[in-house]
Image (cartoon, grey):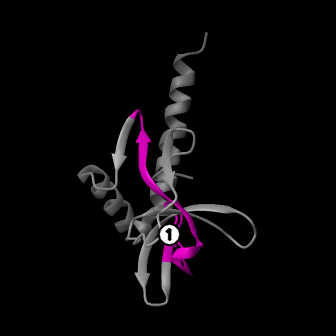
Amino acid sequence: MVTFLRGGKDEAVLSIPESGYVYTKNDIVLYKLGNGLYVLHRIYSIRKDGIYTLGDGNRGIEGPFHSDEFLAVVDYIVRKGKVLKKEDRKYILLVNIWRMIRPFRPLVMKFYSALRLWEYKLKSRFTRK
């Protein structure tokens, strides 16, 4: 599955928010589900009844959550040795594009996975000894 944060390649640097921290749309938060699993998802919307999250590799919105359920928030992301902060223009653009294509994510992910497989097959064909 393709997500905005890539396991094993990107690093998400977390911090425990101070008391009174105001969560905003697109913050990436860590929380624990009732079944004991930890989840790192992006805040999709903030409404009167709570905060709703959406995983970058998901189409379904989860919630409502309350801010006291969040254990940590992502301060910044390290990708290929470069720091991506949520204030950076490039980061904001990428996140907004990813949010806009939400209905089409399964197709985008399938296409991306097919490209990666094709790339792998080509590399293995030309690197055989």
Query: Residue 100 appears at what percent x and percent y?
Result: 34, 67
Q: Residue furthest front?
A: 19
Q: Residue at x 61, y 9 (%)?
A: 129
| Residue 51 to residue 1: above or below | below
Q: Secondary structure at mark 1?
A: strand
Query: Residue 66 appears at what percent x and percent y?
Result: 54, 80
Span of residues in magenta: 52-81
- Residue type at tag 1: Leu
| Residue 22 to residue 10: above or below | below
In magenta segment, residue 64:
yes
Q: Residue at x 42, y 86 (%)?
A: 47
Q: Residue furthest bottom?
A: 48
| Residue 53 to residue 2: above or below | below
Q: Nearer the viewer, residue 88 or 122?
A: 88
Q: Residue at x 51, y 27 (%)?
A: 122
Q: Residue furthest left?
A: 89
- Decide if residue 20 is in sight here: yes
Q: Residue at x 42, y 46 (%)?
A: 77
Q: Residue furthest top?
A: 129
- Decide if residue 61 is in sight here: no
Q: Which residue is mark 1?
A: 54
Q: Nearer the viewer, residue 7 or 97?
A: 7
Q: Nearer the viewer, residue 58 or 103?
A: 58
Q: Is residue 32 left or right of residue 76?
A: right
Q: Nearer the viewer, residue 45 or 118?
A: 45
Query: Residue 26 appears at what percent x and percent y?
Result: 39, 65
Q: Is residue 89 left or right of residue 115?
A: left
| Badge 1: residue crowd in 10 Å (few <14, some 14–19, many ≥20) | many
Query: Residue 31 appears at what percent x and percent y?
Result: 60, 66
